[in-house]
Amino acid sequence: MVVILVDFGKALVPWILFAIFDLVGSSLDFPILREFSPTELAILVFTIILVGAFLAYRGARNEAKRLHSMLDRREVIAGVLASLAQMRDRGVALRHEGKRLRAKLAKEDWTKSIYQWRDLVSWELARLSSTEVALFHTLDWFDAPPFKGVRDRRIRHEMRMLFAETHIILAASLRWQVHLAQPQGFIRPISDLP
């Protein structure tokens, strides 16, 4: 029954459109419209409606893609920030391990784990922006504690570097937290961040 009604409706649509276009063509007093027959006018109006519908569909599809990519980007940012929080904790733990190092072999393993940690942090920051990676690798002056209990100068230097790097991760996390707090659609570019 439903199929018969749908087929009947499809068959009536051209006749209904033809009647509407005939009424529109006869009621409007435009000289250019008088030059068209009702069939030509129907084809012209139908073409205009079809092109308009296609352009509206394309615009809606592009807007949906833009909004979807923004949502995906927000999810990526949230995931990276969670990962950076864990990596910051790992950096603090590495710094505390440095206070207890005595054997030379343990110092080499500790230094290797620091380099691996830095590589992982750089990779995660690169998922946010290349600017954050550059800031992470920029040496800056931090008032790091002197770590007086550590006698090895190299270990003390690495501990101070870890202190600075964990603070850089914290600052980057705070900068990017702003993106998650802002309403969607109003995300500022990285150049506008404080």
Image: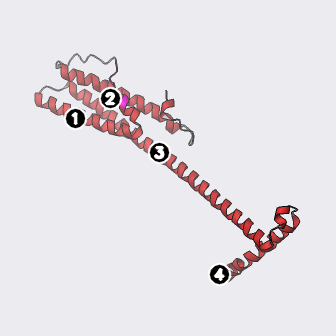
Q: Which residues are magenta?
A: 134-140
Labels 2 & 1 near each other (Cβ < 8 A): no
| Distance (Cα) linking label 3 and label 1 | 30 Å
Q: Nearer the viewer, mark 3 or mark 1?
A: 3
Give the residue type at disc 1. Answer: Ser
Q: Nearer the viewer, mark 1 or mark 4?
A: 4
| Distance (Cα) linking label 2 and label 1 | 17 Å
| Distance (Cα) linking label 3 and label 4 | 45 Å
Which label belongs to residue 113? 1
In the rendered structure, the answer to whether residue 79 lies left or right of residue 113 reads: right
User: Which x, y percent locates residue 184?
Assistant: 56, 42
Q: Which quadrant would residue 45 be assigned to in this image?
A: bottom right
Q: Nearer the viewer, residue 57 or 29?
A: 29
- Residue 45 in the image: above or below residue 94: below
**Mark 1 crowd level (few <14, some 14–19, many ≥20, 10 Å Cα):** some
Which label belongs to residue 3? 4
Labels 3 & 1 near each other (Cβ < 8 A): no
The residue that label 3 is drawn on is 73
| Distance (Cα) linking label 1 and label 4 | 70 Å
Choose the circle earlier in sequence order: 1 or 4. 4
**Mark 2 crowd level (few <14, some 14–19, many ≥20, 10 Å Cα):** few
Choose the circle earlier in sequence order: 3 or 2. 3
| Distance (Cα) linking label 4 and label 2 | 68 Å
Give the residue type at disc 2. Answer: His
The residue that label 2 is drawn on is 137
Regarding mark 1 in the picture, which secondary structure is present there?
A: helix
Q: Nearer the viewer, mark 4 or mark 2?
A: 2
Give the residue type at disc 3. Answer: Arg
- Residue at 28% x, 24% y: name it: 161
| Distance (Cα) linking label 3 and label 2 | 24 Å
- Residue 20 on the magenta segment: no
